[in-house]
Image: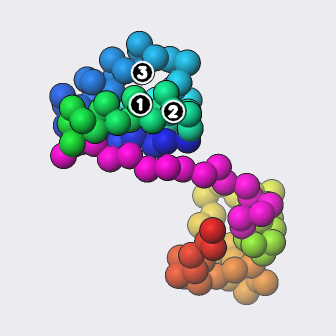
């Protein structure tokens, strides 16, 4: 998929018009951003937007997140435990303190390996 982010009013208007006119290639729209299908047509739409608003448009190729392949077991287990055991008002740091769950500071410092 292609993530397109716009940074000006004119670029947002062009993005909105492209999304309305080519809905079959739009996966999701988020106001100033949109996800286009990872097809040549999606690339054409992204390139058109960059051609018209080169300084106000950013395009990134995205890869779907597979939690089983991309996130470590400890992170998935901590997320499940946190959601099932903690109150909705308990911060994760307080929940994880004194447990085997990953420390939030450590989680912030470690990148996900692609």
Task: Residue 92: name its quadrant.
Answer: bottom right
Residue tagged 2: 40
> Closer to the N terminus: mark 1 or mark 3?
3
Q: CA distance from mark 2 to mark 1?
A: 6 Å
Q: CA distance from mark 2 to mark 3?
A: 15 Å
- Residue 16 sits above or below residue 67 on the image: above
Residue tagged 3: 19
Residue at 77% x, 63% y: name it. 69
- Seen from the viewer's position, the closer of residues 42 and 99 is 42
Residue at 49% x, 49% y: name it. 61
Quarter of the image with the C terminus is: bottom right
Locate residue 104 relative to residue 78 in the image: left or right: left
> Callout 3: 10 Å neighbours few (<14), some, many (20+)?
many
Residue at 55% x, 18% y: name it. 24
- Seen from the viewer's position, the closer of residues 1 and 44 is 44
Q: Disc 2 vs disc 1: Cβ atoms closer than 8 Å?
A: yes
Residue tagged 1: 44
Mark 1: secondary structure: helix
Across and down, in percent, residue 14 comes to: 27, 24
State the extent of the magenta-drawn residues as a range. 55-71
- The reply to whether the magenta stretch includes residue 114 is no
């Amino acid at each position: 998929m292609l993530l397109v982010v716009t940074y000006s009013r004119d670029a947002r208007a062009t993005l909105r018009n492209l999304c309305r006119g080519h809905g079959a290639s739009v996966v999701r729209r988020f106001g100033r951003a949109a996800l286009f299908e990872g097809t040549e047509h999606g690339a054409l739409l992204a390139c058109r937007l960059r051609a018209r608003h080169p300084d106000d448009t950013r395009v990134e190729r995205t890869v779907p997140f597979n939690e089983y392949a991309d996130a470590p077991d400890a992170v998935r287990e901590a997320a499940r435990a946190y959601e099932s055991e903690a109150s909705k008002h308990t911060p994760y740091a307080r929940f994880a303190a004194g447990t085997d769950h990953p420390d939030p500071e450590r989680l912030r410092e470690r990148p996900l390996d692609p």
